[in-house]
Image (tube, rainbow, N blue to C red):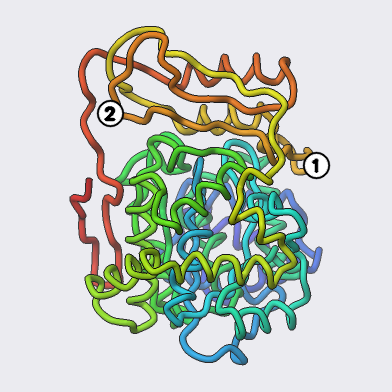
Amino acid sequence: MRMYDIIEQKKKGGELSKDEINYFINGYVAGKIPDYQVSALLMAICFNGMTGRETADLTMAMAKSGDMADLSSVPGIKVDKHSTGGVGDKTTLVVLPIVASLGVSVAKMSGRGLGHTGGTLDKLESIPGFKVSIGMEQFLNIVRTVGASVIGQSGNLVPADKKLYALRDVTATVDSIPLIASSIMSKKIAAGADRILLDVKTGSGAFMKTVEDSVKLAEAMVAIGEESGRRTVALVTNMDQPLGKAVGNALEIQEVCMTLRGTGPRDLYEICMHLAANMLCLAGKGSLKQCRVMAEKSIADGSAYEKLKQMVAAQGGDVSVLDDTSKFDRANIAYDVKAEKDGFVHAINAELCGTASMQLGAGRETKDDVIDYSAGIVFNKKVGDSVKRGETVATLYTSSDELCKAAAKTFTAAFSIDTAQPEVKPYVYARITKDGVQYISDK
């Protein structure tokens, strides 16, 4: 078998066999196949696509390229959750305590933020003392005793994806649904959960900008999950503006606490209720309607918030900052952005807001950048809200005037006000299962 022949076949639109896909992945991870040949194959895949069977075989080959987590010591059905990334997306830290408080274990390996998107690990590390790098046995013990834990990915989890993603990033081969789907699902399968819930973002702050493309990606990932023996459900959710009212690590943790205490912003609460209900349903806790009621009750009676504190304490975090969020480090500078005219907030470009947050110090432009956990943005107004000239629409938090000046320019470009009230968009557009796509009207 030769890599040349595999490239030639895909270049002509042919279908690769399971053996050919395994040869390509195993050879690349072992260092036997050079970058230039893999780049050629990736470009051929971008142009000619892959069948569902090819994509599933690629996913499994990648998942098996390194360590596979063994969650068998954790009793019950384990459900994992994955978001395709967004701005202000702190749903994991709301949803995991909810489902764990209701008896569903979640062992989650998560990632860091890069560019305009935030990372769950960075948010958690804004809690003093919280450790995201712990041994596998300690991780599993926390899941067994507390019900939920979030850690960074292990060094040898899906090495094929690490190598392929780095190459895709520099060869303009990121935007291929088979490659995106296999990248995401290989990590989910290797993480060892029995059931998988996918939160596929759509809109200005998401990788997929249209609902149509987001549904296609969701369908591809659900098919892979089902093919691998994991019951998989996907929701397509709104990321056309930042989620919630806070963007930035410590600011988002504070909003997580508010939401779990029942005082969070409506959009974040609603999307988290959908996600939690679907995770509980996947775990066999009842119908979606019954599971929604259970999720709401866990917030109303305080059990979800208590579960968050248990998880934070188990991983070395200072729980006192959750009860008294004024203990978080505060930014040196708070700059109020004022409305320039009367009207309604017509649009808030989530990607530009994420970029502004990064410029304030809350995110990374490169993997080596150091994060300012206190930096970020807090919104006073969201899309559809009325606003008066001179009224504060958002506050930017940062450590220096220079950073604030650059971020304020970006943020101003993201925020538009019009005389006409905009159309209200749904929080959740669609639910995708192996049985098909169900479009949801939820505002």
- Disc 1 packing (10 Å; few <14; some 14–19; many ≥20): few
Q: Amino acid at mark 1?
A: Asp
Q: How many marks?
A: 2
Say if 271 sits above or below 101 in the image: above
Please say whether residue 61 is visible from this viewpoint.
Answer: no
Residue at (59% x, 79% y) in the render: 146
- How dense is the environment of label 2, judged by Cα within 10 Å: few (below 14), some, or many (20 and up)? some
Which picture quadrant has residue 339?
top left
Mark 2–mark 1 Cα distance, whole angstroms, equals 38 Å
Given contact means CB atoms under 8 Å apart, are the residues at marks 2 and 1 in contact?
no
* Outermost residue toward the left in this view: 441
Going from N to C along the chain, the mark reached first, 2 or 1, is 1
Q: Which residue is mark 1?
A: 368
Percent across and percent down for residue 361 are 70, 32
Left or right: where does residue 197 sit relative to residue 254?
left
Relative height, residue 382 to residue 174 (above, below): above
* Residue 403 at x, y percent in the picture: 70, 20
In this view, 115 is above or below 153: above
Depth check, front residue: 132 or 300: 300
At x 42% / y 43%, what residue is drawn?
208
**Residue situated in front as seen by the camera: 162 or 154:** 154
Residue 164 visible in the snapshot:
yes
Q: Amino acid at mark 2?
A: Gly
**Left or right of 295: which side holds 189?**
right
Q: Which residue is mark 2?
A: 384
Which one is nearer the viewer's eye here, 299 or 238? Answer: 299
Quadrant of the image containing the C terminus: top left
Label 1 residue SS: loop
Residue 203 position (above or below residue 342): below
Q: Position of residue 253 (x, y in %)?
A: 58, 50
